Each structure stands twice: as C-alpha cells, then as structure tokens.
Image (tube, rainbow, N blue to C red):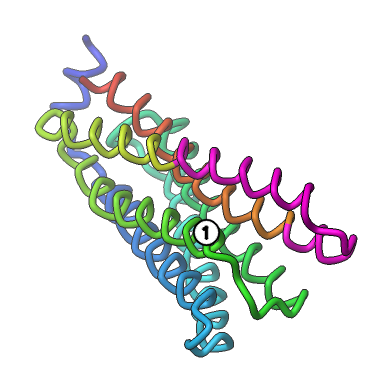
Amino acid sequence: MLLRLFRALMPREEKFIDHFCEHSERIMEAADALHDLLDPTGDRQAAFERILAAEHAADQVTKRTLQAIHRTFITPFDRSDIHALITAMDDTVDFIEEAAQRIMIYGVTEFTPEMRQMADAARQCARLLREGVPLLGSINKNVMHLQRMSVEISRIEGETDTLLRACLSRLTAGEHDPKRFVILKEIYELLEEIVDHCDDVTNVVDGIVIEQV
C-alpha cells in the first residue's frame, strides 16, 4: 500500500512503455516478413533481409530497456517484470529470425499449408501483442482488454501446438528421406516455437496485471 502511494506521488518514467511499444512493432515487422518469406510468389531474399533488420532493431530496443532499468528510480512496474517482459518479447523476434535463417540455410523453397498456417498464427499473435502492449500504460483501465489478448493468444498457441503434433505424426509416418525429415521437422518446430514465445509474453503481462490491479 505504501509503495503504491509512493509511486503515485513520484513522477513516473514512461519511456519503458514506449520501449515495449517500439519492440512490439519490430515483432510485427518480423512476423509480416516471415509470412512473406513463406509466400512462393514473393521476394524471399527481401523478406529475409527485413527479418534480419527487424531482429537487429529489436535487439537495440532491448538493450536500451535493460540499460534504463539500472538508471531509472521510478518504474511503471517492478523491475524484474520489465526485464522479463522485454526479454520474452525479444525471444519472440529471435525465434522468427532463427526460423528464417534455417529456411535460407537449408534452401527450402516449398512450404506446406501447415507451415504457412503456423506463420499466419505467428502474425496473428504479433498483431495482438502490438495492439495490447500500449495498454500497459494504463493497466487499470484496460484489464479486460489485456485479459482478452492473453486468452486469444493462448487459444492460438493451443491450436498451433495441436497442428504441430499432427504434422510431426504425418511426417514420421510418410517421410522416408532422412535429410528431408530432419529439415521439415526443425522448421515445423521453430515455427510453432514462435507462437509459444508470444504466449510467454502474455504470461508475463498476466503477472504484471495481477500485481498492479
């Protein structure tokens, strides 16, 4: 109670919310580019370069955020939560970049409908994060919106996890080329992991909401 009163009387450092919003834009850019990377009619190299640029920019936002934690006296919420949130967000971009790197390294040019479905799921989650993260600037006014974001991303994550299991089951039963099996399995798992990390972000947000309300 005293801590809340103290925080209310002191000026708040709002830059953290700006950092989160900026990072969510980089996640969206990377997810859009991943979708384009899996589009057989698109410019794959250009999409890949967009992912690399978004990942690099996201790293810079993460670095600035972590540095700000140490030099800021008053923060919008607990420092450990700020660290956990920006780290979870950065992990999401990192896995988009990792999936793209593997696709390019392995020279994969044909993608299954399920792969594109997973990329679509990642883009849906990225869009929800971009819409939801700014609401952390006024948590008490936006509890329901933040909870809906969390529920929706969790639903998408569950569907994507189910899709992954089905893909791996079919792959195990029907793919007889060991090299192709390994490549496809890794790409499926990396794409699903992106959605998992989006869900990890909402888990951190859920914790912040509980502490602040």
Q: Is residue 82 magenta?
A: no
Q: Which residue is mark 1?
A: 93
Residue count near mark 1 (Cα–Cα under 10 Å), binned few <14, some 14–19, many ≥20: many
Residue at x 54% of width, y 38% of height:
162
Q: Which residue is the extreme one toward the top?
A: 1
Residue 98 vertical placement versus 211 (above, below): below
Q: Is residue 175 magenta?
A: yes
Q: Which residue is the extreme one toward the left?
A: 141
Residue at x 48% of width, y 87% of height:
42
* Residue 105 in the image, given as x and y percentages of width and height: 76, 76
Q: Locate residue 85 relative to residue 105 in the image: left or right.
A: left
Residue type for callout 1: Val
Count the labels in the image: 1
* Residue 11 in the image, given as x and y percentages of width and height: 18, 38
Q: Locate residue 188 relative to residue 127 in the image: left or right.
A: right
Q: Locate residue 90 relative to residue 143 in the image: left or right.
A: right
Residue at x 28% of width, y 26% of height:
209
* The N terminus sits in image quarter: top left
* Residue 65 in the image, given as x and y percentages of width and height: 44, 51
Secondary element under disc 1, as helix, strand or loop, is helix
Residue at x 65% of width, y 63% of height:
98
- Helix, strand or loop for the magenta stretch, by majority: helix
* The C terminus sits in image quarter: top left
Q: Locate residue 141 relative to residue 33 in the image: left or right.
A: left
* Residue 160 in the image, given as x and y percentages of width and height: 50, 44
Q: Closest to the observer: 171 or 59?
A: 171
Residue 2 vertical placement versus 155 (above, below): above
The magenta region covers: 157-184
- State which quadrant residue 148 falls in: top left
